[in-house]
Amino acid sequence: MTGRRPWDPGPDAAATGRDARVGAGAPSPAASGRQGSTRGGGGSEAPALVAEGLRKTYALGRQTIRAVDGVSMTLRRGEFVALVGPSGSGKTSILAMLAGLLRPTEGSVHIAGEDLGGLADRRLARFRRRNIGFTFQQNNLVPYLTVLENVTLMLSLNGRYDGEGARRARELLERLGLGDRLRSLPSQLSGGQQQRVAIARALIHQPPVVLADEPTASLDTERAHQVVDTFANLIHHDRRAGIMVTHDLRMCRVVDRVVVLRDGTVDRTIEDRAVIERLAEEALI
Ligand code: ADP
Ligand code: MG
């Protein structure tokens, strides 16, 4: 557990509106030396990801569940965003729609300028393979392939497996602390190690957009920070756009923006560096 969470309204939240303004009273963005939202480059560059008016309803018997109820967001290249919120607030549904794994009931997703809604299933699958890296809450590794093969599989599927790809896969796995487990099968790894393989698999084909659902859920604190740091470095350095769903606010330390969800809508967005850092620190208590 991570202690108090800012989306926990608390007993008096409704009366005071406290939870609607976490950033209120905070100092203006710290001159922290990070480039933050300007990292994405010139304003003329097309955004890596644009989601507009996303809605998702599920039919459950005679009931209709509004899992996502009007969510819009734009990510520039080089931007890393955390999606946080209580269980059931729609995080996984949003990420799946952004990844083209789930068709929205309403709204649109553009990735690298392509409207996912305009692609038929096969073209969408191909587009996804090339342009989106995704890690699932359950890591979905192929059980009969080794660690290295699970990662290079993404390259093979894209017809881009070669010596250089294999070298990059090894290097990435080393950076994620798995250099000595290349020939292991997923069943021979801990949950945390499996999660790191899944992260390598999401990054290896160098997609412009990387989406990770709870990538640190099964990692110990030290490893979680390490994985998220590596993740952030790769996103910033290679100017990819990344979204990480997390329950652990400490992991927000490295992101450029925190989007807080509640009941399928964006409750608030926090971009102020100082506020993000405070959020991540306070989660330690
Ligand atoms: P989170 O990842 O934040 O926990 P989800 O996107 O998984 O949220 O779920 C949002 C809401 O939609 C929840 O109320 C959940 O029970 C419901 N839901 C998710 N997937 C389905 C589904 N396939 N069928 C019906 N309801 C679903
Ligand atoms: Mg989820």
Image: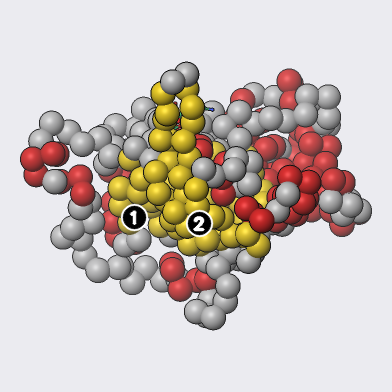
The answer to whether any part of residue 145 appears in the image is yes
Q: Which three-letter amino acid code belongs to the residue tagged 2? A: Ala
- The residue at the point 43 percent across, 41 percent down is 68
Q: Do the CB atoms of the residues marked 1 and 2 lie less than 8 Å apart?
A: no
Q: Is residue 140 above or below residue 153?
A: above
Q: Nearer the viewer, residue 82 or 103?
A: 103
Q: Secondary structure at mark 2?
A: strand
- Split into 4 quadrants, where in the image is the N terminus? top left
Q: Is residue 67 left or right of residue 7?
A: right
| Residue 85 visible in the picture | no
Furthest residue toward right: 162
* Residue on which the image places disc 1: 269
All told, the count of numbered labels is 2
- Earlier in the chain: of badge 1 and badge 2, it is 2
The relative height of residue 92 versus residue 277 in the rendered view (above or below) is above
Report whether 136 appears left or right of 76.
right
Q: Which element is circle 1 on?
A: strand
Q: Is residue 20 above or below residue 233?
A: above
The image position of residue 74, as x and y in percent, is 48, 62
The residue at which mark 2 appears reads as: 51
- Residue nearer the viewer, 177 or 105: 105
Give the percent coordinates (x, y) of residue 128: 71, 50
User: Around disc 2, counting alpha carbons within 10 Å, would you say few (fewer than 14), some (14 to 19), or many (20 or more)?
Assistant: many
Residue type at the position of mark 1: Thr
